Image (spheres, coloured by chain):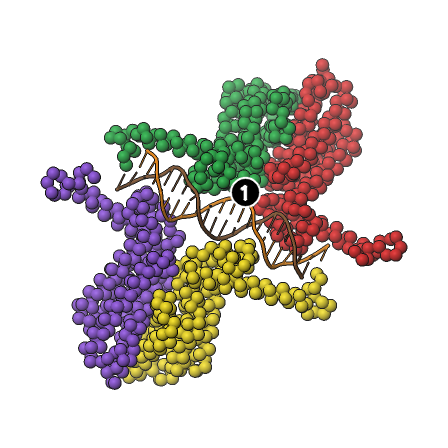
Chain colours: A purple, B yellow, C red, D green, E orange, F brown
Amino acid sequence: MTDKQPSNGTISRSALRRQREKELRYQTILRAAETLFAQNGYHQTSMEQIADLAEVSTGSVYFYFKNKADLLVHLLTEIGGFLRMLVGTEFRKFDSSIEGFKSAGLVFFKNFCLENPEKVAILFRESTGQSLEVETLRKSLFDQLTADIKNALIQISKRRAADFTARLSVEVMAVCIVGIYERVGYHYLLWQNRSEDIMTIGEDAVDFIIGGVEKLIEDAAAK
Amino acid sequence: MTDKQPSNGTISRSALRRQREKELRYQTILRAAETLFAQNGYHQTSMEQIADLAEVSTGSVYFYFKNKADLLVHLLTEIGGFLRMLVGTEFRKFDSSIEGFKSAGLVFFKNFCLENPEKVAILFRESTGQSLEVETLRKSLFDQLTADIKNALIQISKRRAADFTARLSVEVMAVCIVGIYERVGYHYLLWQNRSEDIMTIGEDAVDFIIGGVEKLIEDAAAK
Amino acid sequence: MTDKQPSNGTISRSALRRQREKELRYQTILRAAETLFAQNGYHQTSMEQIADLAEVSTGSVYFYFKNKADLLVHLLTEIGGFLRMLVGTEFRKFDSSIEGFKSAGLVFFKNFCLENPEKVAILFRESTGQSLEVETLRKSLFDQLTADIKNALIQISKRRAADFTARLSVEVMAVCIVGIYERVGYHYLLWQNRSEDIMTIGEDAVDFIIGGVEKLIEDAAAK
Amino acid sequence: MTDKQPSNGTISRSALRRQREKELRYQTILRAAETLFAQNGYHQTSMEQIADLAEVSTGSVYFYFKNKADLLVHLLTEIGGFLRMLVGTEFRKFDSSIEGFKSAGLVFFKNFCLENPEKVAILFRESTGQSLEVETLRKSLFDQLTADIKNALIQISKRRAADFTARLSVEVMAVCIVGIYERVGYHYLLWQNRSEDIMTIGEDAVDFIIGGVEKLIEDAAAK
DNA sequence: GATGAATGAGCGTTCATTCAT
DNA sequence: TATGAATGAACGCTCATTCAT
């Protein structure tokens, strides 16, 4: 705490370095936890293993994270943000059209699942059925995703002059779509290791969704 | 040696009663585990708690089940069989038609989810991300469900003279449908407690599925 | 208890048969325990395993033996008696001469060790360091053996008109001899499996003992 | 990072002190286990008792030793090394002569048995008939002792220009001698508490051994 | 006498968390 | 800040023993 601020208002070089090192350590620990949780499971991973992989002491882990669940909470938050960013970007790019829907789906399978299988494992497997705190966070992440999809659906229906909600709760549709993404990713990446086929599979899944959505829009518009 | 075998080859009454009592104890313990796993979570439940709720000693629990994971395995197997029976019955009743599809979906939400929320919690939440053994069993249960749905889809497509597989892998469709059931049940029963609305919600979800399937059949038939 | 004694004083046939069966069961259980203790170790053997091998219920084991230690106590007593009988017979046959000494040694290696390796395991390995009760019995068995040998040594020394005790405590000599028997049996049968060589080895050991004894007799006589 | 490495390459004082304290704790725990194993027996001693006597927590015991058997393994290794050192030193001092033999024997009874009865209890009683791992270690310790004695015997026979092996396997002789030491120590210290007489008894035992050896050397030389 | 289900004290072990240095 | 030894509650599990039938 001595050399944080030199006499003038700027931050000293060594303070900056320490800041960087701190951030680096934080990341190293988080990545170690991610790797081990995904690989061996949350309960099968001890704090000591995480510390070992991150090459720090157990005490240090507790300096950066208040407890074991906190590691999962941070990972989950990070993963949730990352996923929303990926999908949201795609929707914005295509202006919430049906094209954006298709594109977002493919981005999910390619840039999320395929490139980050550990995140899939943590989001869909390891964070399931843990403490109340984690489950609450998990719920809120899923709720956000659902809300995003719901909004996109509403925009599309408006554009087509169809009143979606008349025939089907848009929210339920959104929940269904989330369920599809989740199980397809889980099934083909965590259970089977079909990394090479995942894009074809993803296209099929997106087709199923689009097909369903289109049909229901037609029905709604027909009324 | 007194009452096991009367002079003739039949089993004596008291032996039968003991048999019944043994089966009863087994059930009592299994139900206690189910309740506690669903309520507090697998890891938050101790063997002593299970014994207490079942009103037996911890030793007795180990007489009927070889270890804690074994309890989960038995529950999961039971739940998987029950679910397949429910859904399969419905398909058979409607001769694998699209009506059967609708009916099976509703049965899932009514007779499985609504009437057995603990089973939902265990199948979709508590059994996730446990030991390799449990995860393997879980995978096989999901695989069976997927295969059942896949077969139904193939039968329907045959009846309509449409070649489904041309447009979309039937298996992926089946996986999507399983994903929908899973997440809708989880979302509206475990996260929100919408027991009263579950049937309406279930109908919506089934409509989404039917919509998607119909659309894809049309597309396939058009070719 | 009804048909034990017919009106006259003789024992009924069925009572006799039951007597025989009881004795048989007792033996079956004891032999099962002996086998398992020798094979897997006393602590690594459970009462259930013994009951299983003897093809009776655990309850029956407790009818014949008051507890687990009691099994070991009975085995040990039996083994001790058997060993004393073997060796004693030999001494008596040769009239406590140096020939009897030699002969008894060889009988130990042949008729005790070679033909009953399980008894070697139990007497020298499994009964060591158990409860106070077992250790006390073990001590008394060793004491008896020691006393037998001591007496033989005294007789021999008397015959040679040598005063053994002048040079060396006869008891210590006896203890030494017991130690030789014990370790040679343990070393070459339990650690190495030299069943085929055991007689040659035994002869060597007996030679060592005889050599020592002779030498000390000479020394004593010389005085 | 504060006091681990001062600017130069040496280890700081406080790091040294911590090192010492760690070694001290290790010793305290090991000594507690030794005391309790010798006093109450290995199986009758719980990890909690050891922790209590060492005035640490059970967790600490597991920090220093991987499990209960590991404690016994460490004790046994330590005891084996100590014994070999004692006896070996004596042999070297007397240049593997018959005098060294005598001296080594007395050292065994005085500096090993008399001064460390707990070690006698653990080496000859508590380590017997435990797990495979312990029994293997035990065997290797006895094998080493046997080999040491065997070598000494060979040297002596060479010096006397006698071919020992002609009459008697040297190895068997060594095994006999080990057996004598073992049983005499066990008999007079663990069973009877003859601490005051142990030296006289030890001399007797050594005399018996020397007597035997001399006789056999004479026999061998005579041929 | 025989059975085997039931008991429950007891033990070894783990591991998240703390804290003196 | 960082360390890592220390803690101790908690848990899964075993198994000798009992006892109602």
Residue A59, placed above or below residue A89 = above
Q: Is residue D220 visible?
A: no
Where the N terminus of chain A falls, by quadrant? top left
Where the C terminus of chain A falls, by quadrant? bottom left
The furthest residue to the right:
C8
Q: Position of residue A110 (x, y in %)?
A: 26, 64
Residue under mark 1: which chain is it in?
A: D
Residue D60: quadrant of the picture: top left
Q: Residue at x 73, y 39 (%)?
A: C81
Q: Position of residue A138 (x, y in %)?
A: 32, 61
Q: Which of the two residues, C4 or A1, is positioned nearer the viewer here?
A: A1
Residue A189: quadrant of the picture: bottom left
Q: Residue at x 24, y 80 (%)?
A: A163
Residue at mark 1: D131
Relative to B221, D57 lies left or right: right
Q: Position of residue C125 (x, y in %)?
A: 61, 39
Disc 1 marks a residue whose amino acid type is Ser
Mark 1 neighbour density, 10 Å: few (under 14) some (14–19) many (20 or more): some
Relative to A65, D104 lies left or right: right
Residue B210, placed above or below residue A187 = below
Q: Position of residue D8 (x, y in %)?
A: 25, 29
Q: Residue at x 40, y 74 (%)?
A: B109
Q: Residue at x 48, y 37 (%)?
A: D52
Secondary structure category for the residue under label 1: loop
The furthest residue to the top:
C223
Q: Which of the two residues, D89 or B101, is positioned nearer the viewer here?
A: B101
Relative to C211, B148 lies left or right: left
Residue B91, placed above or below residue B79 = below
Q: Which of the two residues, C97 or D170, is positioned nearer the viewer here?
A: C97
